[in-house]
Image (cartoon, helix red, strand yellow):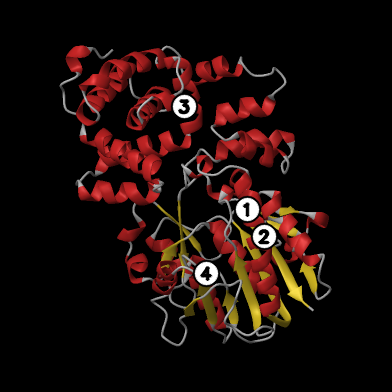
Amino acid sequence: MAGPQARARPADRARRVAFDALRRVTGEDAYANLVLPGLLAERGITGRDAAFATELVNGTCRWLGTYDAVLEAASGRPSSTLQPAVVDLLRLGAHQLLGMRVGSHAAVSATVDLAGATVGRRVTGLVNAVLRRVAERDLDGWVGRLAADLDPDDRLGRLALAHAHPRWVVEAYADLLPADELEPALAADNVSPGVSLVVRPGLVEPEELRAAADGPGRWSPFAARAVGNPADLDLVRSGAAGVQDEGSQLVAWGLTRPAAAPGPWLDLSAGPGGKTALLAGLAALDGSRVLAGELAPHRAALVAAGSRAYPPGERPGVVVADATRPPWRGDSFTRVLADVPCTGLGALRRRPEARWRRGPEAVGSLHPLQRALLTTALDAAAPGGLVAYVTCSPHRHETADVVLETLAGRDDVEVVPAATVLPDLPAATTGPDDAFLQLWPHRHGTDAMFAAYLRRR
């Protein structure tokens, strides 16, 4: 184990970049998947060191709530009594001890060195003592120790600790899934997803992308798997292909599957533009064109950039617009995508810090906006036109409740059953009469995307 004599040693570069990234995530609300790659490139960290730093940051962010409980038990004091930078040091040390194949001596001594190089020598004794206590048990041992303080019948509380999810998220999953699927669903959120690519239809055939990448995807006819950095592929650099989860591909493709008359398409909340780019190619093949609305100017720029490889006549028209006060005419579009803002609970596996960023109140605060955007989408659809209401969340109050509450006040909309839209997806329906689509990481290997397909009468 580390001792006082180790305090003066410099921190290694991988751990230092992980610490700097984590400080920005916890102190500035940055996103780990955005801030870390830039820091690695800036400091020239590649190969095994980059992989180590990435796992250290992502794993720490993912398990943050459980690690905080462990650290409070090990230190005998609330984390709020410690300097935030010291808490982050302890979190990084805890992940090395409990979540990585790093020996106890190396994990403790390296974190002590990091503490001395960043916060100062005055905190190294505290860091050393707390992490020595953490090292006395493995993760299962700590979960058992912490769970002993819970009610013996509190299964959800134990699962929250064991799988590093806030209690309210576990409760939301339990409301949706059979009891025997709850734990696999939580576990799937803690497995980093592989890279999924998508073609821009009409610019490149899926077979060409799959040959250049690592074979086909699992469900989407537009998908390919990638190993390594997708930016190394010529098709991705040129914009003829992009990075997109298969779940996102499927819900967008579903909008194009039922029959509808020719005419303009609308993506009313389009940023950052992955679904827009897929729809633009499919619309061009149908002789149509997409109008993309986005409230934030910088996200509108991303929408335009994502479709840059299409010929000018096939690129989506991009407007900076508030979809709750739309600048477009109603009753005008034959296909409308409403991919609404949500809590992002469906993408926890790729956004490791997201589960700790919001509480259950966020669901209620987003609900009125989600209903307003669905209403805008339905009003924008021409008679006979199709609407897809999409969220990257499985939470009932963001999905089926929004649709059912909105439709209760209308007599001009009918539901198109999801099983008729995407019939080859097993165990992928939810809601009354299994009318809606719900994907899950543990079932389908995709983000937990929801979609309701609706037709304007």
Instruction: Specify whether residue 196 is in view.
Output: yes
Up-down: is 238 above or below 341?
below
| Neighbourhood count class around disc 2 (C-alpha, 10 Å): few under 14, some 14–19, many 20 upward | few
Quadrant location of the N terminus? top left
Do the CB atoms of the residues marked 1 and 2 lie less than 8 Å apart? yes
Quadrant location of the C terminus? bottom right
Disc 1 residue type (three-letter)? Ser
What is the CA distance from the residue labelled 2 to the residue labelled 3? 33 Å
What is the CA distance from the residue labelled 1 to the residue labelled 2? 7 Å
Up-down: is 381 above or below 339?
below
Point out which mark residue 270 bears.
4
| Neighbourhood count class around disc 1 (C-alpha, 10 Å): few under 14, some 14–19, many 20 upward | few
What is the CA distance from the residue labelled 4 to the residue labelled 3? 37 Å
User: In the rendered image, which residue does mark 1 sit on?
Assistant: 365
Q: Nearer the viewer, mark 2 or mark 3?
A: 2
Mark nearer the N terminus (4 vs 2)? 4
What is the CA distance from the residue labelled 1 to the residue labelled 4? 21 Å
Residue for point 51% across, 77% down: 280
What is the CA distance from the residue labelled 1 to the residue labelled 3? 27 Å
User: In the rendered image, which residue does mark 2 sit on?
Assistant: 368
Mark nearer the N terminus (1 vs 4)? 4
What is the CA distance from the residue labelled 4 to the residue labelled 2? 19 Å
User: In the rendered image, which residue does mark 3 sit on?
Assistant: 68
| Neighbourhood count class around disc 4 (C-alpha, 10 Å): few under 14, some 14–19, many 20 upward | many
